[in-house]
Amino acid sequence: MRRKIGRFKKLGASKVSVPNLTGLTRSQAQSALAAVGLGYSESTTGTSNSGLTGYIQSQGSSSGSTVLRGATISFVYYSYVPTITYGACEAYGGGTNIGSGTQCSGTYYQSYTDYSYNTRKKIFSDGAWDGVSYTTSGCGTSTSRSVTASSQVDGLCGYTPPCTISSYSGYSYSGITWSGSCPSGTESGTATNRSRTDNCGNVYNESGSYAVSRSCTVVETWGPCQSYTFTQPTCNGEDSYVGNYTGYRKTSNLGNTTTEGCASASFTGFGACIASNGYGCGGTNANGPCYTPPPQDPPSGPPAGPPAGPPAGPPQGPPQGPPAACVPDGSYTYVYPGNCSYVCYGTTLCCSDAINSCGVYEYCDC
């Protein structure tokens, strides 16, 4: 029996060589496979190189290998993937008022209100934004401060309004030549410089020739101690008399006197009686008058002879009170502390113990 080998060969599936897809585009690869009776399956891989978009990256069956006609050959082609970047988080929508207050901005005093906003960021593809793409990933909320008023206020935020010059101080002088050594009184001179300050603190200096003067301070000097006399009431027992004294004092070139550094005053004797049995001298009467014997008429004939008997007894004592004819005329001798006296005339007391014109010592409670 004759075998028909050729017939069976004809009926078997034919094989084809797998084409090389490298360097082809997607559509070219599809066409090359279809030309040899092969099918295809495809997938993509990303690339950031836009020039590779659509070109074959790899194929499932090696080029030149033999496969049955109608087999499916897989390949992978490049698909461009753009570079994605993001902008900064930005506030959007309506804000929520979270408080207000005041602050300084430089020298400006401001009022403000704070608001809280939700935030989002733009999505950029290859550096370009399509105008609608956002994401809130990685964003939260932000606070925005709205200044509602701003002004410069005297004394706030370190602000002081500009000064307006309205007054000047007096001049001060320097470079002065005086006419002498200023022994006393006032001395004149000439200054070569002067300056003054305005109310804003600006200093003005001037040079020239300016007449000036100064008051001189005289140094007080004292002469030697010299004696002088004075009187003051002095007790003689329980009676008050004018006491005579010699004191010592020195006089200055300004006419002032002092007893400092001199010998103490010394008593030199009594003068007229001032008052009897006075309180000031330990007596019991309020400065009673001094006793003055009444006048006696001379005898009208020859002496009457010796008295007929012993005297009738001791005298009854001085009269109590001033003579009726003595009326104080308003004149007083006023006695001052410091071993000195001064005579005043008139009715005004000098606020010191005094002796009136009738010789009565009067105390003054000052």
Image (spheres, rainbow, N blue to C red):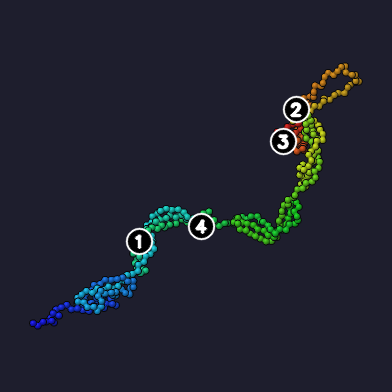
Determine which of the numbered discs, if any, sits on residue 283 in the image.
2
The quadrant in which residue 85 appears is bottom left
Amino acid found under the numbered disc labelled 2: Gly
Find residue 137 and name its label.
Answer: 1
Question: Where is residue 66 shown, x and y percent of the image?
Answer: 22, 78
Badge 4: how crowded within 10 Å, few (<14), some, or many (20+)?
some
| Cα separation between marks 2 and 1 | 119 Å
Q: Which residue is mark 4?
A: 107
User: Which residue is pictured at 37% across the width and 60% down the height?
Assistant: 139
Asked if labels 1 and 2 touch by Cβ distance under 8 angstroms, the answer is no
Q: Residue at x 22, y 74 (%)?
A: 72
Q: Are marks 3 and 1 in contact (CB under 8 Å)?
A: no
Q: Is residue 331 visible?
A: no
Question: Which mark sits nearer the N-terminus, 3 or 1?
Answer: 1
Residue sticking out furthest to the front: 1
Amino acid tagged 3: Cys
Q: Residue at x 32, y 70 (%)?
A: 81
Per the image, the residue denoted by label 3 is 351
